[in-house]
Image: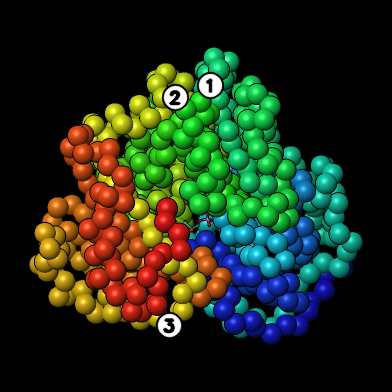
């Protein structure tokens, strides 16, 4: 039976960079999840009888939320809900299923790389029929709706057994529970040379992939160990746990430090890798060589043609604005366009749909291609494996050769987490106000060449997104970017992105902190970080 339940709006249900993210107890507030889900459905048109893909990263409250969303989706008129067994779907796998089964869209429950658990974070986002995160036009409509909502619809029925695959009728529609891995694994087999990669493992190549007790475990175990023959033990923490086993599933040098330490030992694995809570990020560390996500994007773009799925070459490369410009050099050499978009995968969707770009990436450990409409952690690792299998060289050798050919973009991101929102907003405002006077200013040997507040004009749908981050360019090719995070759930997080180009191979092996030293100091001076935030050091450097 379909029930209509009266409700009143909750404040602050505005989706950020990637959906709505809040502390778990907020989502557990009666009506909170329901209001947002109803607002999604109220903002969509024409889904009567259509299919909705539904899954999440397995974190605490995932199963309960899955039950609510599927009962609401059926009550609102969807015909069929395709759910990953156990409520599990990685973000890229959900994107693939939406496309493969021509679903109307999908709901992904995840707070990605944020910690889970009763005191951690929870999140939800809507993806459109192309498999990608809903564009700003839709997320803003959802937000408007949350402010006016007065009722939601839900099916009154017993919970569905999420652990048994198969179809069942439920109320006016149907639910189908599917293996979360099978379709995704099949797609990977189409894109990459699995025989060749299996040969690499047979020859003794050693991989350590840490699923961090989050969603990628079942995918990685099936693909790396069962299909490609990597020995048991290659995949660590493979069981998704509601609290991620206490791990913070953010694949960076802080939370995956143990992988870095392992990769830096003389007899360490050839490749250490990890993904995040929902499986869309990737960390790549070769023996003796950490690969920055920006470099990884550039190197994968330069070598993608070595994998069967990209043998025809790339149509274009897209990167988010703060991502280093290493990929620009590759696009230039390949003679393909380079697109610079605001932060967040939703801005790549149009470019991919229109066939303008093939590979996309972000400095935040996100890389992907037109195979889905999300970034894809395991895809990036498989493309690396395919490249390694063909080239027969180490990661270190491939990276250093790439720098010698294209130059090196030294790069670091400084995050000042959970600072007071007022101070952070004031800092950005002060920078914005100072912009007109910055050009031509000298700081020691450095001179500002250009400075602006990044705005993006989407070449496909003509939409404009303004205030996407303060960019300061220096005459020698260096750059500092400032923006506020749109994924946090407490206070504000200031991100400072620092980059310098080094064309001379003799100077490419410096420590990043040394190569960027003067710019790092300057990033404080120009923005008054200590003054506005009270912080003299970042919380995390990646
Ligand atoms: C961060 C990253 C951004 C990424 C987003 C979602 O956003 O900087 O590049 O797309 O997270 O990633 P922000 O607004 O906090 O800087 V995921 O893996 O959390 O869905
Ligand atoms: Co993620």
The x, y position of residue 349, in whole percent, is 45, 52
Say above or below: 359 vs 45. above
Q: Quadrant of residue 221?
A: top right
> Disc 2 marks which residue?
388
Residue named by callout 3: 422
Task: Please say if 163 is above or below 38.
Answer: above
Q: Earlier in the sequence, mark 2 or mark 1?
A: 1
Q: Residue at 14% across / 75% down in the picture?
A: 437
Q: Count neighbours of disc 2 (C-alpha within 10 A) and say few if under 14, some if 14 to 19, many if 20 or more.
A: many
How far across and down, in percent of the image, does residue 185 sit? 63, 33
Closer to the camera in the image, 246 or 467: 246
How many marks can you see?
3
Residues at marks 3 and 2, CA–CA distance in whole angstroms: 48 Å
Mark 2–mark 1 Cα distance, whole angstroms, equals 10 Å
Q: Is residue 223 visible?
A: no
Decide which of 201, 6 is in the foreground and name it.
Answer: 201
Q: Which residue is mark 1?
A: 205
Residue visible at 34% across and 58% down in the picture: 497
């Amino acid at each position: 039976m379909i029930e209509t339940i009266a409700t009143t709006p909750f404040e602050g249900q505005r989706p950020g960079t990637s959906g709505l993210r809040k502390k778990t107890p907020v989502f557990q507030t009666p009506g909170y999840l329901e209001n947002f889900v109803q607002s999604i459905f109220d903002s969509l048109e024409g889904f009567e009888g259509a299919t909705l893909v539904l899954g999440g990263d397995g974190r605490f409250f995932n199963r309960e939320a899955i039950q609510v969303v599927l009962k609401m989706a059926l009550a609102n008129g969807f015909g069929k809900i395709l759910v990953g067994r156990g409520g599990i779907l990685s973000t890229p796998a959900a994107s693939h299923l939406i496309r493969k089964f021509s679903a109307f869209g999908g709901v992904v429950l995840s707070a990605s790389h944020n910690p889970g658990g009763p005191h951690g974070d929870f999140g939800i986002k809507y993806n459109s029929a192309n498999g990608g995160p809903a564009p700003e036009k839709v997320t803003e409509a959802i937000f408007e709706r949350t402010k006016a909502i007065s009722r939601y619809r839900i099916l009154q029925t017993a919970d569905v057994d999420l652990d048994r695959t198969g179809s069942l009728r439920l109320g006016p529609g149907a639910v189908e529970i599917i293996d979360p891995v099978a379709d995704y694994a099949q797609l990977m087999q189409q894109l990459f040379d699995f025989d060749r990669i299996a040969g690499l493992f047979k020859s003794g190549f050693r991989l350590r992939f840490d699923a961090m007790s989050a969603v990628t475990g079942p995918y990685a175990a099936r693909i790396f160990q069962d299909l490609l023959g990597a020995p048991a033990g290659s995949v660590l923490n493979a069981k998704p746990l509601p609290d991620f086993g206490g791990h913070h599933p953010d694949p960076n040098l802080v939370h995956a430090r143990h992988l870095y330490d392992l990769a830096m030992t003389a007899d360490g694995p050839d490749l250490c890798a990890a993904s995040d809570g929902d499986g869309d990020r990737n960390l790549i560390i070769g023996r003796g060589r950490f690969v920055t996500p920006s470099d990884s994007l550039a190197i994968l773009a330069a070598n993608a043609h070595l994998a069967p799925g990209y043998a025809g070459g790339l149509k274009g490369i897209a990167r988010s604005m703060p991502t280093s410009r290493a990929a620009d050099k590759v696009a230039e050499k390949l003679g393909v366009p380079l697109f610079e978009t605001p932060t967040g995968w939703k801005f790549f969707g149009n470019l991919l749909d229109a066939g303008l770009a093939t590979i996309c990436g972000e400095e935040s450990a996100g890389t992907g291609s037109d195979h889905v409409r999300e970034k894809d952690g395991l895809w990036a690792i498989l493309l690396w494996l395919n490249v390694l299998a063909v080239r027969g060289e180490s990661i270190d050798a491939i990276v250093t050769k790439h720098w010698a050919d294209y130059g090196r973009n030294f790069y670091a991101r400084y995050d000042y987490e959970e600072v007071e929102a007022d101070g952070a907003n004031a800092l950005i405002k002060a920078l914005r106000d100072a912009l007109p006077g910055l050009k031509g200013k000298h700081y020691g040997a450095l001179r500002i060449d250009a400075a602006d507040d990044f705005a993006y004009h989407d070449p496909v749908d003509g939409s404009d997104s303004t205030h996407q981050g303060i960019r300061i360019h220096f005459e020698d090719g260096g750059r500092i970017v400032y923006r506020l995070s749109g994924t946090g759930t407490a206070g504000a997080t200031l991100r400072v992105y620092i980059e310098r180009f080094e064309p001379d191979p003799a100077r490419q092996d410096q420590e990043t902190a040394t190569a960027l030293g003067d710019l790092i100091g300057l990033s404080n001076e120009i923005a008054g970080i200590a003054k506005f935030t009270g912080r003299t050091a970042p919380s995390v450097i990646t």
